[in-house]
Amino acid sequence: MSPGFKGGIICPMVSFEQKSIILLLIAGLLLTSCGPNLWGTNAPDLTPSPISSETPTEFSTPTSTNLQPPATTPATDTPPEPTSTLTATVTVGTPRPSLVYFSQSGDSLEAVALHFGVQAAEITSSGSLPVSGLLDPHTLLLVPNLLSQITTTPATQTIPDSELVYSPSAVGFDIEQYIDSAGGTLRSLQVPLINGLTSAAHAIQQIANESSINPRMLLVLIQYHTGWVQGVPETGVDPNYPLGYRNSQYTGLFMQMHLMVKELLAGYYGWRDGSLMSLTFPDGTSLRLAPDLNAGSVAMQYLFSRHLNQEDWLQAIDPNSGFPALFTGMFGDPWERAQETGPLFPPGVAQPVFSLPFEVGVLWNLTSGPHAAWEQESARGALDFAPAGVQDCAESTAWVVAVASGQIVRSEIGYVVLDVDPDGLEQTGWVVLYQHISSKDRILVGRQVKAGDHIGHPSCEGGTATGTHIHIARKYNGEWMAAGDPLPFVMSGWIAHAGSALRQGSLTKGNRTITASPVGSYESQIIRRAGE
């Protein structure tokens, strides 16, 4: 059964022991009841709704037949439990002084407070709560019930986080093999990229790698809008605007997917950091998001709310007949896969020891504090560093180095990806992205490195850049990690902090502070010392 509000208690996947605790807490509550790119890494960050002025206002809605799974699709091992028909608005519980909520993977105390519309200090627990970092999954929280009379979106969770991001659940999934076996139009489709025509499978793989969106999700969205993945394609699909975004600057499947990915990222990371609290539909109506949703489900609700008014939107997100049913029909039960791979963020997750990404004794500048890791809508997970004395996009001989030991899993025009885990898989564990790495002396894919080994030189290659620098960001189990709280980027003991505005911020170590400056001021200078 999907998580939801039940008599003032929010209980995602509770165990017998947790239910016993809930009963005791309910008794206590009742006794006292009379008394919340390469596609432009240098663009501004997310504005939750609308996400961007470039997002098209005209959108072609897919026909309902695309929602039906093909008749040849094998049944899932464990059919999903039936869910009642979704309603247009849901009243959050009945008036009670507090709600019981079990934290989900990826929750921070601050984000939970924002989801529920309370202050973090107002949330209590049966045990001690961490002052920083992520909450362990299934941590019991008592939250003031301030939303009891507020109508929200349905609280039904539809897509696990691990099926939205390019996570361990996608390890071993072969996009090309699936497309070939499905036998649809996509199998023979050629997609134009910068270097010429390529297969649809290659284009989807590139988008999955770069944005870290799960390729299964991308394939289901293509099927939903076009029918090109399986069976007979839908009639009337415009090949210039196959996903419905009628924008002349984004024609063809690859560019259309670019726009759809931006909306998925906006929903997912807007919920993760607490900046997205409600949905606004094309007709101007709005709904607050149910506070117990997971980030993956919010991403789907947000995507469809951008283009459908409430009645059609409810049909699109319905687990029995909408997009989630199509997803299950194509790839089996996503919740079973999520259960097999475990939570994206297991209890006690922490960043490994990283060093600063440049050589000892060389002067660099922190030119940008936390900002978008990839698209402008993704997590504010990146920091920018520039070598001192290099003007504009001049060539630099300074070396960018590995922040930790690991394997180079991608090395392409403008960027390098370092897997810090021993498995050599980008979808698992900690991964570091270096962008704007010069083609000259760039490290080759497959190389094993130790902390401090040369990666390449900073440049303006790969994405928009106004000067020679590097853009560095982290992922964990496929999710872009914010550079500031709740799990700050730490390198050589320097802790990243987000500023009050995009690209502002600092690094601190003990009583020392380095402040980000795009012009390389004295306050932004940083030198890696011996032993760091």
Image (cartoon, rainbow, N blue to C red):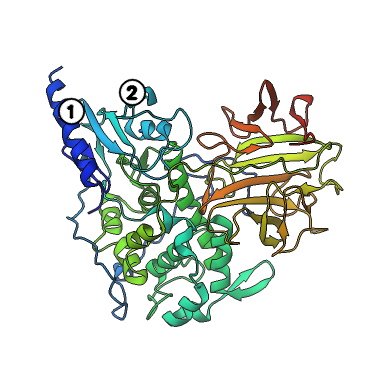
Q: Which residue is mark 1?
A: 96
Q: Is residue 24 left or right of residue 529?
A: left
Q: Position of residue 371 (x, y in %)?
A: 60, 39
Q: Which kind of residue does numbered mark 1 sit on?
A: Arg
Q: CA distance from mark 1 to mark 2?
A: 15 Å
Which of the pair 278/62 is nearer the observer?
278
Residue lying at 77% horizontally and 43% vertically, measured from the top left: 358
Relative depth, front residue between 445 and 16: 16
Q: Nearer the viewer, residue 160 or 37?
A: 160
Q: Residues within 10 Å of mark 2 (few under 14, many from 20)?
A: few
Q: Is residue 181 visible?
A: yes
Which of the 4 quarters of the picture holds residue 367?
top right
Residue 522 image offset from top left, x and y in percent: 79, 25
The quadrant of the picture occupied by the C terminus is top right
Is residue 524 toward the left or the right of residue 341 in the image? right
Question: Which quadrant: the N terminus?
Answer: bottom left
Q: Give coordinates of residue 418: x percent, y percent.
A: 66, 55
Q: Earlier in the sequence, mark 1 or mark 2?
A: 1
User: Circle 2 — which element?
Assistant: helix
Give the answer, above or below, for where 409 lies relative to 388. below
Quarter location, residue 274: top left
Q: Which residue is mark 2?
A: 122
